[in-house]
Image (tube, rainbow, N blue to C red):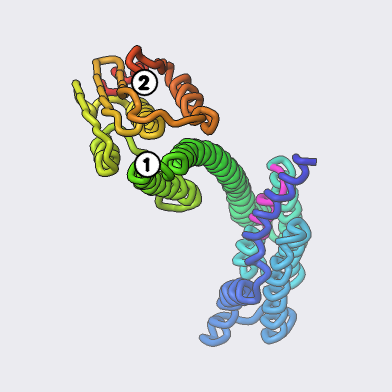
Amino acid sequence: MVGETQTVQESAGTGQVIQAMRSPVFTAVVFLATVVQVCADPLVALWTGAGEWGHQLPPAVVIGLAALGCLAQALCVTQAAHRPVSAMLGALACYLAIALWLGVPTWASPMQLVVAVAMFAVGSARSIPVAAAWAGASVLVAVVGLGLWAAAAGAPTGAVVSFVLTEGTALASVCFAGVALGMLWAVLERRTQRARRRALAFKAQQAEAVEASRNAERGRIAQELHDVAGQHLAGLVSLCDASVELAPEHPQQALHLIEEVRAEGRYAAASLYGALGDLRAVDSSAQTPTPDLRSLSVLVAFWRERGMDVRVTTTGDLQSPPVVVSTTAYRAISEGLSNAAKHAAGAAVDIGVHVDADRLTATVANGPARRVRADEDDLGLGWGLDSLRQKLTLVDGSVDASADDQGGWHLGVEIPFPRTTEAERD
């Protein structure tokens, strides 16, 4: 069924080209181009008075019948789009009728070109053996007809042979040339159709891949939204609970906690705004680049503006790591700072980034929390480190997250560079 559909589509593509032959303009052009050449010799001879009219019929009748033959031949060619063989046979019959019935084969020679046009349609619509067979049979019929007509007219054998060779060669050359050009056009048209189908299939596959990528990105951003909401809402609820407990006896400390609630709420809003901005960018034509270590100073400045004591130490060139390594390390540092803000409010945070020739190491370490928040662990979703471990697994990296003896927390990641990095650089 698929093969039949493909054949129909390819034939339709060729038929669309031949459709131009059905145009009245095409018919008029073919008719005028042929009738002018067919009637030129007798009209010039009559106009100049050179020679005697040797035909049995009057000049006006012969010229009129020749013009009607040219018109009939042009009309036959208009059927080439749907019935190419019938159009070719009709065009050949018109040529032979003028050449043999009227007895003016020399005048009718220009009509051979119209037969060649019909042969083009046959060559484009039929297989090579079939089209070649039709061309050979047509030439053979015409040659036999011309030879019999010349012999019946009483011409010498040598003259008959010369006449048949001249007219037969001219007809054969244009007929087989028309068939060959039609075959070539059909081949090029089928290649174009196949290329068009491949382009459409590739476009569909590309659209599916883009949609799958968008869905995956939506899932990733949804997980980040859960992380942001879980972390910051947990912190907000803990601070509110503590402020409620302290308010009756320690109003100043309760007000201080409320200030922390406000700061935490601002950061939560900023984090949610960033994640929602990424979600909008999934369906946007202009997407913001994924942040990496080149944006580390911006991330650190963000937390310092919110009162966090952050110190940064870097060794190596932060521009050299591959993009996937740099973005993953940035995510790890961001996760470490977010956890420090949630679980160790007021504690100093130390960030270390070390870039070697083949790997990157990043650490985020904070001291103990300034204030212990009751039931804080029960409020977290626990997706942050799990998501980070999944990201590190994809790049063959490792994660080390543990508490220290002083009540602080240490988060370290080690990410090797891809093995192809050096070869790509070379």
Q: Nearer the viewer, residue 90 or 393?
A: 393
Residue 99 spot, x, y in % from top left: 70, 67
Locate the N terminus and report the quarter of the image it occupies: top right
Residue nearest the observer in this picture, 231 or 417: 231
Q: Is residue 233 above or below residue 327?
A: below
Q: Is there any visible trace of residue 119 in the rendered image?
A: no
User: Is 230 situated left or right of 186 in this image?
Assistant: left
* Residue 205 covered by magenta stretch: no
The residue sitting at the top extreme is 405
Q: Secondary structure at mark 1?
A: loop
Tell me which amino acid carries mark 1.
His
Q: Which mark is residue 409?
A: 2
Binning the other alpha carbons within 10 Å of mark 1 as few (below 14), some (14 to 19) or many (20 upward) gives few
Q: Which residue is mark 1?
A: 250
Residue at 39% x, 16% y: name it: 403
Tell me where residue 250 appears, x and y as whole percent: 37, 41
CA–CA distance in space, label 1 to label 2 = 29 Å
What residue do we see at 48% from left, 51% from top?
280
Q: Nearer the viewer, residue 372 or 30?
A: 372
Q: Main secondary structure of the magenta part?
A: helix
